Image (cartoon, rainbow, N blue to C red):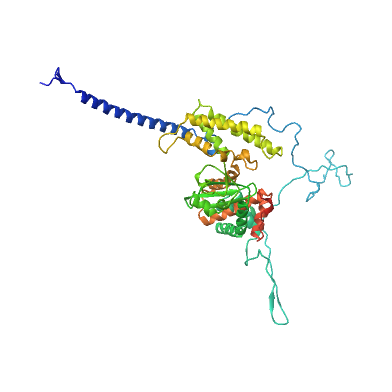
């Protein structure tokens, strides 16, 4: 009989027990790894659920009903509305009205007698500011023919706007483009508006043709703007998704406070940026987010600066993810303090932030990143946490993050590019999508022209009218920024 037989049960041998323990250890190890993965997944999902316009690149419109609580700034002590001593604004009476209508009382308000011979004792003046009723007017151009004594018949030259037997003029065409591109009115509603307000029964096809023709007329201006962008000292670049014909495309922008150019491409990547042709030739300071598309090794001619607003939101997210850690708050406050110091230095006409101020906050920022790296060591493998990736970027690309603090011509944020992209997102929300790349390209070219003109203080309708009549406004090369 087996010595291990006890009370009818065979006891396992030492080797068998060790094998069971070893198998259980492997199961426990696998479960521990799985638990760690699930915990990391829970943290990531919580992070995504907690994303809003304060801690990510999501726009405020995506925050939904439960909007994030904003950090309240110290009260100014001022009551809402107009402040004491501030100049008021009201509808002013014009000294030289266009039309004067006299109203004379016909009978006395007391006894009822006639006032035909009554003395004039004063006048009460009221002005009504209004617009005349809008309606199209037809101008007929008659090009007369004359026969010379030599027998040759000469015909007068038609004006540029009279391109056919019956055509709509440049004012109506400029209004159509203005409504389409600047006011984001869809094509069909633009045709309806022109019919209802102006009495011009235009077709949707006509509206689309006018936009395409205006875009073609601005081809040389578009090239000039891109050339001036390449020569600028600071350039802002960004991209956003859009829809063309029901398919995703990417809208790329390159801009300055005085110039705007757009580029439509199916790709978000470097192939699109290269096709745009601005950043590959640019040798100034390029401000952008941390998207790898714009990396310095891909475009070595430029000096690069990272958007501080993006970093501020990422640090805010790190604060919320790790509430017990101080380094995200210290890093964020140091960046904001440097930005404030940069604004003050510019306002004072200084070329640099005072060294003692700059060094203090630069040291605080570097110390915060060092502490964060120690608290979030690198995990085995390539994939790292969001926090670790942020910390490594702030460490390895510190010169790009802090460019604004060393060169006061460089802004803290890439808000200029985001502002210039916003009209395209507004158009997408209102009109859903462009039907073709041809129409989208024309719309974007006109939009870039309008944006550039407005940055120079040019009236939008005047700029569009000049483009339609063959004399488009062009940005002066002397005003580069």
Q: Quadrant of residue 138?
A: bottom right
Number of on-image labels: 0
Check the image and report above or below for 38 versus 280: above
Q: Quadrant of residue 341?
A: top right
- 423 and 169: which one is in front? 423
Q: Residue furthest bottom?
A: 150
Across and down, in percent, residue 365 comes to: 57, 32
On screen, residue 150 versus residue 178, left or right, reads right
Across and down, in percent, residue 255 comes to: 60, 48
Check the image and report above or below for 38 versus 303: above
Q: Residue furthest left?
A: 1
- 90 and 446: which one is in front? 446
Kindly tell me whether residue 68 is visible in this rendering.
no
**What's the residue at 21%, 23% (across, down)?**
14
Kindly tell me whether residue 449 is visible in this rendering.
yes
**What's the residue at 50%, 35% (across, down)?**
391
- 184 and 50: which one is in front? 50
On screen, residue 114 versus residue 389, left or right, reads right
Across and down, in percent, residue 154 comes to: 69, 76
Check the image and report above or below for 326 versus 384: above
Quadrant containing the N terminus is: top left
Across and down, in percent, residue 470 comes to: 65, 61
């Amino acid at each position: 009989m087996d010595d291990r037989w006890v009370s009818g049960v065979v006891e396992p041998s030492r080797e068998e027990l060790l094998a069971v323990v070893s198998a259980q250890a492997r199961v426990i190890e696998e479960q521990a790894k799985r638990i760690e993965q699930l915990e990391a997944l829970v943290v990531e999902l919580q992070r995504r659920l907690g994303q809003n316009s304060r801690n990510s690149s999501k726009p405020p419109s995506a925050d939904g009903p439960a909007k994030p609580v904003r950090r309240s700034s110290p009260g100014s002590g001022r009551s809402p509305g107009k402040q004491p001593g501030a100049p008021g604004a009201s509808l002013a009476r014009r000294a030289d009205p266009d039309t004067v209508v006299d109203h004379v009382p016909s009978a006395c308000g007391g006894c009822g007698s006639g006032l035909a011979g009554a003395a004039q004792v004063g006048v009460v003046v009221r002005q009504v500011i209004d617009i005349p009723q809008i309606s199209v007017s037809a101008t007929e151009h008659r090009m007369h023919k004359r026969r010379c004594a030599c027998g040759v018949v000469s015909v007068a030259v038609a004006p540029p706007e009279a391109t056919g037997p019956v055509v709509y003029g440049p004012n109506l065409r400029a209004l159509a483009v203005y409504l389409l591109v600047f006011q984001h009115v869809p094509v069909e509603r633009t045709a309806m508006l022109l019919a209802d307000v102006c009495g011009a029964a235009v077709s949707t096809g006509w509206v689309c043709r006018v936009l395409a023709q205006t875009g073609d007329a601005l081809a040389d201006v578009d090239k000039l703007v891109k050339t001036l962008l390449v020569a600028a000292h600071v350039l802002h670049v960004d991209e956003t998704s859009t829809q063309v014909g029901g398919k995703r495309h990417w809208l790329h922008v390159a801009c300055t406070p005085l110039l705007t150019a757009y580029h439509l491409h199916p790709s978000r990547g470097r192939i699109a940026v290269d096709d745009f042709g601005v950043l590959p030739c640019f040798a100034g300071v390029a401000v952008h987010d941390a998207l790898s598309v714009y990396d310095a090794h891909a475009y070595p001619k430029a000096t690069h600066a990272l958007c501080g607003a993006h970093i501020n939101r990422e640090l805010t997210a790190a604060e919320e993810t790790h509430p017990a850690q101080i380094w995200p708050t210290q890093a964020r406050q140091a960046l904001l303090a440097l930005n404030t110091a940069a604004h003050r230095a510019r306002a004072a006409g200084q070329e640099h932030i005072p060294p003692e101020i700059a060094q203090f906050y630069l040291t605080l920022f570097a110390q915060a990143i060092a502490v964060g790296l120690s608290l979030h060591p690198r995990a085995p493998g390539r994939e790292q946490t969001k926090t670790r990736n942020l910390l490594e970027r702030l460490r390895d690309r510190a010169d790009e993050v802090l460019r604004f603090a060393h060169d006061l011509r460089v802004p803290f944020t890439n808000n200029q590019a985001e502002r210039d992209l916003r009209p395209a997102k507004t158009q997408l929300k209102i009109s859903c999508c462009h039907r073709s790349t041809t129409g989208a390209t024309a719309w974007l070219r006109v939009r870039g022209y309008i944006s550039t003109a407005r940055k120079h203080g040019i009236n939008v309708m005047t700029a569009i009218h000049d483009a339609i009549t063959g004399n488009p406004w062009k940005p002066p090369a002397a005003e580069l920024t």
